Amino acid sequence: DVDTLFVADDTHAWGDFSEKSDTVKIHDEKQKESVDLSDIAAVHTHLNGGRVYFMPKEKLPQSNTKVNAIYKSGS
């Protein structure tokens, strides 16, 4: 489980997520069926008791990514 999620507030991570098969497919650019995977990650983190922070990409702990996570110990 994710304890803390840091999300770049000025970018998107487009792709498909299937909760049924627990799979993710990342798209290079938005497609008709694309969803913003960072939004899905943020919602799931929040619903499972984690903290979510949206910030400029250059302020992320790893600024070469769009999303950073700290996992709960023991996960």
Image (cartoon, helix red, strand yellow):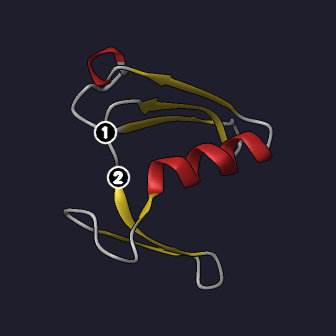
Q: In the displayed structure, does residue 58 sit left or right of residue 45?
A: left
Dividing the picture into quarters, in which one does residue 52 lie? top right
Q: Amino acid at mark 2?
A: Ala
Residue 45 x %, y %: 67, 44
Could you tell me which secondary element the residue under label 1 belongs to?
loop
Q: Which residue is labeled 1 in the image?
A: 11
Residue 14 x %, y %: 34, 60
Residue 16 x %, y %: 43, 73
- Marks 2,1: beta carbons within 8 A: yes
Is residue 1 in sight in this rendering? no
Residue 23 x %, y %: 50, 76
Residue visible at 26% across and 25% down? 63
Few, some or many residues within 10 Å of mark 1 (<14, 14–19, 20+): some
Residue visible at 33% across and 31% down? 10
Q: Amino acid at mark 1?
A: Thr
Residue visible at 80% across and 38% down? 49
Q: Which residue is labeled 2 in the image?
A: 13
